[in-house]
Amino acid sequence: MANTKEVRKQIASIKSTQKITSAMEMVAASKIKKTQNEMQLGRPYSEKIKEVISHIANSSSEYSHPFYEHRETKKACFLVVSSDKGLCGGLNINLFKQVISKSAELKAQGIESNFALIGLKAASFFKSVGGDVVANVQKLGDKPDPDALIGLTKTVLDLHRNGEIDQVYLCGNGFVNTMTQEPKVEQLIPLPAEETDELTTTHWDYIYEPEAQELLEGLMTRYIESLIYHAVIENSACEQAAKMLAMKNATENAGDLIKELELLYNNVRQAAITQELSEIVGGAAAV
Amino acid sequence: MSTIRVSIVSSSEEIYSGEGTMVFATGSLGEIGIAPGHTPLLTGLAPGPVRVQNGDDEKTFFCSGGFIEIQPDLVTFLSDRAERAESMDEAEAIKAQELAEKNMHDKESELDYTKAAAQLAEAAARIKTIQKLRKNK
């Protein structure tokens, strides 16, 4: 049977771990509010730009943008949004599983894939799994800067423009609520056709100032950028929520463990006392 | 009086959403006035003031570059960054302009010319907005 000193030591070490996990839980809980707030603030822009894009899609435009073009697909690119830090449960790994299964599905159709990665966790995962990584951004921090994503977006869009990739998928976690996050793999390019709108019935087009191509090129790029930025923000809210949950569970588990160990400690202590007593009694009887 | 729905949004927040009888802004090909029933137009948005008139009431906002979409009944400003004109500090703006000018003349500077020119245009537009506001007071 274990001795009391050993058990006491174990209890102390679990207690200090519990302190850390409960502190991390509280930090994550306060960060959720911030990231959720940021998600709210960015929403009007994404909604408006989406509205404009759907208007354009419904207009009988003189110029059709390559992002709408469905061409024969030989290669697809997965834009994977992950977190930089771990300790957030199965958040990242659930997403990667979906990406891998989607990529395998495409491979069965003869479509190769490569990856553009956001976040340290994705980088280390695809390094160990092996995959053609075309771009990578890391360490965006708690407050991702839209400018930090421009380089990655440009790399992917340029590859599409040059015909090296034909499809782009945006993969990230969707924030349902603090308890639930849902990994999503969505097609980014070609842009899925929007549901019809009252504007389609009539034949109309914009006046473009200056050139249609130049304007749409800029607008489309901004749209894609805003979608990616939104995915990053959403993923960061998911990360905090998942972290809070994981740390809450860890704290509870530590509590259970401590209870069990304390019981064991008391048993051991009592056994030692009983043994001592019986020794004394035995000794007295012998005399 | 007929009105047009105006929304001004930047990538980080919603700046303004409401009705207007007349809207003035700087498009990439010059100043434009937008009245209700305007023909559909898509144009670039140059850094500068956006004035929204609603009857006698007038509000001014500063927008940096972006896009303007106009439909007969609505106008949307997609600005990369926008701020309320009242909150701008003229001294700050002049400082930014000086810095941009310095960067432009400074041949040693690593900053490329186009970026400096854009910075200068933005700073100039900011000052223009503030001065316009002062005049109206």
Image: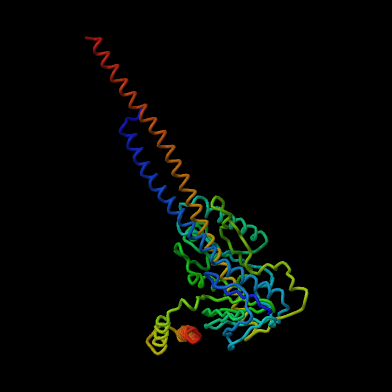
Picture coordinates of residue B119 (x, y %)? 46, 83
Q: Is residue A35 visible?
A: yes
Q: Is residue A271 above or below residue A212?
A: above
Q: Is residue A259 above or below residue A280?
A: below
Q: Nearer the viewer, residue A273 or B27?
A: B27
Determine which quarter of the picture holds residue A109. bottom right
* Residue lying at 46% horizontally and 76% vertically, measured from the top left: B87
Q: Quadrant of the N terminus of chain A?
A: top left
Determine which quarter of the picture holds residue B39. bottom right
* Residue lying at 61% horizontally and 86% vertically, measured from the top left: B32
Q: Nearer the viewer, residue B2 or A112?
A: B2
Determine which quarter of the picture holds residue A254. top left
Q: Quadrant of the C terminus of chain A?
A: top left
Picture coordinates of residue A119 (x, y %)? 48, 62
Q: Nearer the viewer, residue B94 or B16?
A: B16
Q: How is the image coloured?
A: rainbow
Q: Is residue A214 visible?
A: no
Compared across the picture, whether A281 is left or right of A110 comes to left
Q: Give the number of callouts.
A: 0
Q: Is residue A286 above or below residue A84?
A: above
Picture coordinates of residue A132 (x, y %)? 54, 64
**Residue lying farthest to the left in this orientation:** A287
